[in-house]
Amino acid sequence: MAQPEFDDIAETFDFLDDWEDRYRHVIEMGRALTPMDDALKVPANKVEGCASQVWIFPRIDGQGPQARFDFLGDSDAMIVRGLIAVLHALYAGRTMAEVAKIDALAELGRLGLDEHLSSQRSNGVRAMVGRIRAYAASHLAGAG
Protein backbone atom coordinates (compact mmCIF):
# COMPACT_ATOMS: atom_id res chain seq x y z
CA MET A 1 0.00 0.00 0.00
CA ALA A 2 3.06 2.26 0.19
CA GLN A 3 3.67 5.16 -2.11
CA PRO A 4 6.36 4.72 -4.78
CA GLU A 5 8.48 7.30 -2.95
CA PHE A 6 8.31 5.22 0.22
CA ASP A 7 9.09 2.04 -1.72
CA ASP A 8 12.20 3.83 -3.04
CA ILE A 9 13.30 4.52 0.53
CA ALA A 10 12.77 0.86 1.45
CA GLU A 11 14.83 -0.23 -1.57
CA THR A 12 17.60 2.18 -0.63
CA PHE A 13 17.57 0.83 2.92
CA ASP A 14 17.85 -2.72 1.54
CA PHE A 15 20.89 -1.60 -0.46
CA LEU A 16 22.54 0.11 2.51
CA ASP A 17 23.80 -2.72 4.70
CA ASP A 18 25.10 -0.62 7.55
CA TRP A 19 22.68 1.13 9.90
CA GLU A 20 25.01 4.15 10.09
CA ASP A 21 24.62 4.58 6.31
CA ARG A 22 20.85 4.34 6.68
CA TYR A 23 20.95 6.89 9.48
CA ARG A 24 22.96 9.28 7.27
CA HIS A 25 20.46 8.72 4.44
CA VAL A 26 17.56 9.70 6.72
CA ILE A 27 19.45 12.84 7.78
CA GLU A 28 20.08 13.73 4.12
CA MET A 29 16.36 13.30 3.44
CA GLY A 30 15.72 15.76 6.27
CA ARG A 31 18.10 18.27 4.74
CA ALA A 32 16.19 18.01 1.45
CA LEU A 33 12.80 18.49 3.14
CA THR A 34 10.84 21.54 1.98
CA PRO A 35 11.43 24.25 4.61
CA MET A 36 8.55 25.17 6.87
CA ASP A 37 7.87 28.86 7.37
CA ASP A 38 8.55 29.96 10.95
CA ALA A 39 5.05 31.51 11.03
CA LEU A 40 3.65 27.95 11.00
CA LYS A 41 5.74 26.89 14.00
CA VAL A 42 2.97 27.68 16.46
CA PRO A 43 1.57 25.64 19.36
CA ALA A 44 -1.40 24.43 17.27
CA ASN A 45 1.00 22.70 14.85
CA LYS A 46 3.40 21.38 17.49
CA VAL A 47 3.44 17.63 17.98
CA GLU A 48 3.45 16.71 21.65
CA GLY A 49 5.22 13.55 22.77
CA CYS A 50 8.43 14.16 20.84
CA ALA A 51 11.78 14.70 22.56
CA SER A 52 12.63 17.30 19.93
CA GLN A 53 10.51 20.20 18.81
CA VAL A 54 8.31 18.99 15.94
CA TRP A 55 5.68 20.80 13.90
CA ILE A 56 3.30 19.38 11.31
CA PHE A 57 1.04 21.59 9.23
CA PRO A 58 -1.55 19.75 7.09
CA ARG A 59 -2.36 20.82 3.55
CA ILE A 60 -5.56 19.23 2.27
CA ASP A 61 -6.78 19.64 -1.29
CA GLY A 62 -10.48 18.97 -1.73
CA GLN A 63 -13.29 17.71 0.45
CA GLY A 64 -14.38 14.35 1.80
CA PRO A 65 -12.60 11.01 1.59
CA GLN A 66 -11.11 11.74 -1.85
CA ALA A 67 -9.40 14.95 -0.69
CA ARG A 68 -5.63 14.74 -1.12
CA PHE A 69 -3.37 14.99 1.90
CA ASP A 70 -0.01 16.71 2.12
CA PHE A 71 1.84 18.38 4.94
CA LEU A 72 4.76 20.55 5.86
CA GLY A 73 6.89 19.47 8.76
CA ASP A 74 9.97 20.59 10.62
CA SER A 75 12.04 19.81 13.67
CA ASP A 76 15.02 21.24 15.49
CA ALA A 77 16.75 17.82 15.24
CA MET A 78 18.19 16.66 11.90
CA ILE A 79 17.32 12.99 12.37
CA VAL A 80 13.74 13.96 13.20
CA ARG A 81 13.56 16.13 10.06
CA GLY A 82 14.59 12.98 8.21
CA LEU A 83 11.87 10.97 9.91
CA ILE A 84 9.37 13.66 8.89
CA ALA A 85 10.63 13.24 5.30
CA VAL A 86 10.07 9.47 5.56
CA LEU A 87 6.51 10.07 6.79
CA HIS A 88 5.99 12.57 3.98
CA ALA A 89 6.99 9.91 1.46
CA LEU A 90 4.48 7.54 3.07
CA TYR A 91 1.51 9.91 3.29
CA ALA A 92 1.80 12.79 0.80
CA GLY A 93 -0.53 12.65 -2.16
CA ARG A 94 -2.81 10.07 -0.60
CA THR A 95 -6.53 10.52 -0.28
CA MET A 96 -7.80 11.17 3.22
CA ALA A 97 -9.47 7.75 3.15
CA GLU A 98 -6.10 6.12 2.34
CA VAL A 99 -4.30 8.14 5.04
CA ALA A 100 -6.74 6.79 7.62
CA LYS A 101 -6.02 3.18 6.58
CA ILE A 102 -2.21 3.24 6.37
CA ASP A 103 -0.51 1.03 8.95
CA ALA A 104 2.42 3.40 9.31
CA LEU A 105 4.19 1.41 12.00
CA ALA A 106 4.15 -1.72 9.82
CA GLU A 107 5.41 0.26 6.83
CA LEU A 108 8.14 1.87 8.93
CA GLY A 109 8.99 -1.59 10.20
CA ARG A 110 10.07 -2.44 6.65
CA LEU A 111 12.87 0.07 7.15
CA GLY A 112 13.97 -1.43 10.47
CA LEU A 113 13.53 1.93 12.17
CA ASP A 114 11.78 0.36 15.13
CA GLU A 115 14.96 -1.62 15.89
CA HIS A 116 17.38 1.30 15.62
CA LEU A 117 15.65 4.35 17.05
CA SER A 118 15.80 5.24 20.71
CA SER A 119 12.58 4.77 22.65
CA GLN A 120 12.17 8.58 22.74
CA ARG A 121 12.50 8.80 18.94
CA SER A 122 10.12 5.86 18.47
CA ASN A 123 7.59 7.59 20.73
CA GLY A 124 8.05 10.74 18.66
CA VAL A 125 7.37 8.87 15.42
CA ARG A 126 4.22 7.39 16.95
CA ALA A 127 3.16 10.89 18.04
CA MET A 128 3.69 12.24 14.49
CA VAL A 129 1.73 9.33 12.99
CA GLY A 130 -0.99 9.93 15.58
CA ARG A 131 -1.20 13.58 14.60
CA ILE A 132 -1.48 12.71 10.89
CA ARG A 133 -4.16 10.10 11.60
CA ALA A 134 -6.05 12.65 13.72
CA TYR A 135 -6.02 15.10 10.79
CA ALA A 136 -7.49 12.38 8.57
CA ALA A 137 -10.12 11.38 11.12
CA SER A 138 -11.12 14.99 11.69
CA HIS A 139 -11.37 15.65 7.95
CA LEU A 140 -13.37 12.50 7.31
CA ALA A 141 -15.72 13.40 10.16
CA GLY A 142 -16.53 16.63 8.33
CA ALA A 143 -14.36 19.05 10.26
CA GLY A 144 -11.94 19.41 7.33
Image: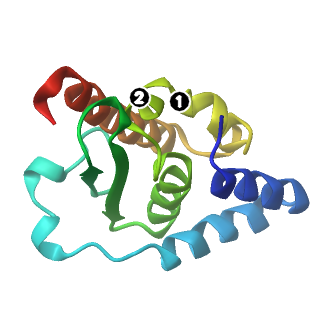
Q: Is residue 94 left or right of residue 44?
A: right
Q: Do we see residue 17 in this rendering?
A: no
Please state which of residues 72 and 84 is positioned toward the viewer in this rendering.
72
**On the image, which quarter does residue 39 sit in?**
bottom left
Q: Do we see residue 124 in this rendering?
A: yes
Q: What secondary structure is found at the residue carrying circle 2?
A: helix
Q: Position of residue 9 (x, y in %)?
A: 71, 57
Residue at the (50%, 78%) spot, across then down: 31
Residue at the (20%, 28%) spot, across then down: 138
Q: Quadrant of the N terminus?
A: top right
Q: Position of residue 112 (x, y in %)?
A: 73, 42
Q: Position of residue 44 (x, y in %)?
A: 10, 48
Looking at the image, how many numbered discs can be counted on the residues?
2
Mark 2 or mark 1, whichever is nearer to me: 2
Q: Position of residue 32 (x, y in %)?
A: 51, 78
Residue at the (22%, 32%) spot, across then down: 139
Q: Residues within 10 Å of mark 2 (few under 14, many from 20)?
A: some
> Which residue, given by chain and number where applicable, does mark 2 sit on?
97
* Mark 1 residue type: Ile
Q: Is residue 2 left or right of residue 49?
A: right
Q: Residues within 10 Å of mark 1 (few under 14, many from 20)?
A: some
Please state which of residues 96 and 46 is positioned toward the viewer in this rendering.
96
Residue at the (68%, 53%) spot, across then down: 4
Q: Is residue 47 left or right of residue 66?
A: left
Q: What secondary structure is found at the residue carrying circle 1?
A: loop
Whether the residues at callouts 2 and 1 have beta carbons within 8 Å, the answer is no
* Mark 2 residue type: Ala
> Which residue, given by chain and number where applicable, does mark 1 sit on?
102
Q: Quadrant of the C terminus?
A: top left
Q: CA distance from mark 2 to mark 1?
A: 9 Å
Image height check: is 46 above or below 32? above
